[in-house]
Image: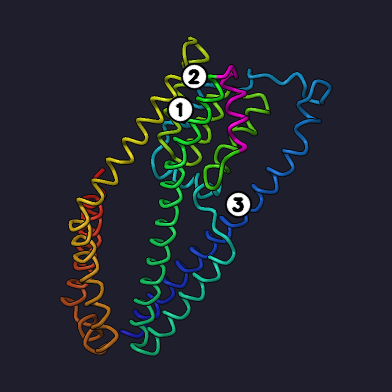
């Protein structure tokens, strides 16, 4: 009975592992395809959208405000999925996928040799969870870097507008002095701008792809400037100051809450570490507990409570 249960868990874990690897592979393929399409678009745009091009009559009437509003109202998990499929923040290279697969295989082998079937299941679940957390942290770090670079870009736009350039021209000229990751993000908006879309719509689309609220604010400022006029440079300068002040406040809050977040990590990881040590050091004890109906109920209840507690601690430590 215990062997069949262990094999069942192992099969489920292998399926989850295969699904994770498949998602990682598809994300990498989407990123490479997106880069290839961007290179092709840069070469084809003068021929397609020029005065004598095949689509020279293209205008902004193709844009559907209602469809864009529906896209903005999608749920958070849908936005995360769209970001993964588009490769915006989740641009996973082949090297990262290889390292993840090697780490998962090594941990699974250690679990199998240390504690048999239960060790294999625990090691697979642990390795997949660690991989997901690392990739999520990587995406969030990229997003924070993008937001930190945005005020410098806005300052460049303000200087270019103040010497007589239009917001559209200032945006295009400011793109030449960018570094990653904001370069890829705003070059996407620049490509849409060259294709005939309004500047505010292009920036809003990039904000949606990268899930950056600050870019949504910039898009709103540009939209107001296009529709009602006014000093866009003054408003953009204030937006840049606001982003800097907000980033400074977040860094201060991050420093003040370091002990709280560390305590949350310890409380969340302690049951997992203790349970893993029990499985690896005395697998027969856990197997006897699993074979008993009451023990199985306690293990399942402990897993559910651990998941709920980890989520609550994450929400508390996030401070948002």
Give the image quarter of residue 165: top right
Tag of residue 218: 1
x, y (%) of residue 309? 20, 59
Q: CA distance from mark 2 to mark 1?
A: 9 Å
Q: Mark 2 and mark 3 in contact? Answer it, CB < 8 Å.
A: no
Residue at position x 39%, y 57% in the image = 137
Is residue 170 in the magenta section?
Answer: yes
Q: Residues within 10 Å of mark 2 (few under 14, many from 20)?
A: some
Camera-side mark, 2 or 3: 2
Is 244 displayed left or right of 191 in the figure?
left
Q: Which portion, as a residue range, is magenta? A: 163-176
Find disc 2 in the rendering and name its residue: 223
- For mark 2, give the secondary structure: helix
Image quadrant holding the C terminus, namely top left
Q: Residues within 10 Å of mark 1 (few under 14, many from 20)?
A: many
Element at badge 1?
helix
Residue 254, horizontal then vertical, whole percent: 26, 50
- On whether residue 159 falls in the magenta region, the answer is no
Q: Is residue 156 above or below residue 34?
A: above
Of the two numbered discs 3 and 1 in the rendering, the one whose residue sits closer to the viewer: 1
Q: CA distance from mark 3 to mark 1?
A: 26 Å
Residue 11 at x, y = what percent? 44, 74
Lower position in the chain sequence, tag 3 or tag 1: 3
Measured as percent of width and height from the top left, residue 216 is found at 44, 30
Residue 31's tag is 3
């Amino acid at each position: 009975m215990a062997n069949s249960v262990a094999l069942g868990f192992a099969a489920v874990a292998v399926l989850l592992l295969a699904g994770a690897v498949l998602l990682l592979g598809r994300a990498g393929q989407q990123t490479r395809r997106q880069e290839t399409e961007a290179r092709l678009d840069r070469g084809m745009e003068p021929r397609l959208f020029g005065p004598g091009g095949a689509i020279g009559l293209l205008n902004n009437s193709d844009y559907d405000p209602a469809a864009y509003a529906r896209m903005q109202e999608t749920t958070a998990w849908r936005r995360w999925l769209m970001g993964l499929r588009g490769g915006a923040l989740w641009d996973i290279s082949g090297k990262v996928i290889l390292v993840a697969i090697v780490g998962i295989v090594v941990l699974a082998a250690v679990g199998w040799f240390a504690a048999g079937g239960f060790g294999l299941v625990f090691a697979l679940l642990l390795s997949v969870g660690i991989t997901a957390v690392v990739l999520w942290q990587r995406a969030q770090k990229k997003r924070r870097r993008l937001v930190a670079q945005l005020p410098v870009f806005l300052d460049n736009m303000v200087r270019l507008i103040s010497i007589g350039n239009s917001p559209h021209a200032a945006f295009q000229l400011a793109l030449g002095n960018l570094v990653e990751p904001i370069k890829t993000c705003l070059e996407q908006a620049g490509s849409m701008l060259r294709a005939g879309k309004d500047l505010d719509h292009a920036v809003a689309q990039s904000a949606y792809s990268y899930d950056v609220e600050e870019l949504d604010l910039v898009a709103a400022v540009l939209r107001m400037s296009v529709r009602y006029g006014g000093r866009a440079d003054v408003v953009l300068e204030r937006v840049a100051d606001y982003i800097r002040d907000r980033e400074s406040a977040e860094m201060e809050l991050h420093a003040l809450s370091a002990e709280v977040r560390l305590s949350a990590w310890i409380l969340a990881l302690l049951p997992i570490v203790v349970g893993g040590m029990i499985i690896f050091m005395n697998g027969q004890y856990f197997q006897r507990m699993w074979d008993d109906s009451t023990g199985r109920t306690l293990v399942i209840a402990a897993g559910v409570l651990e998941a709920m507690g980890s989520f609550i601690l994450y929400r508390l430590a996030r401070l948002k």
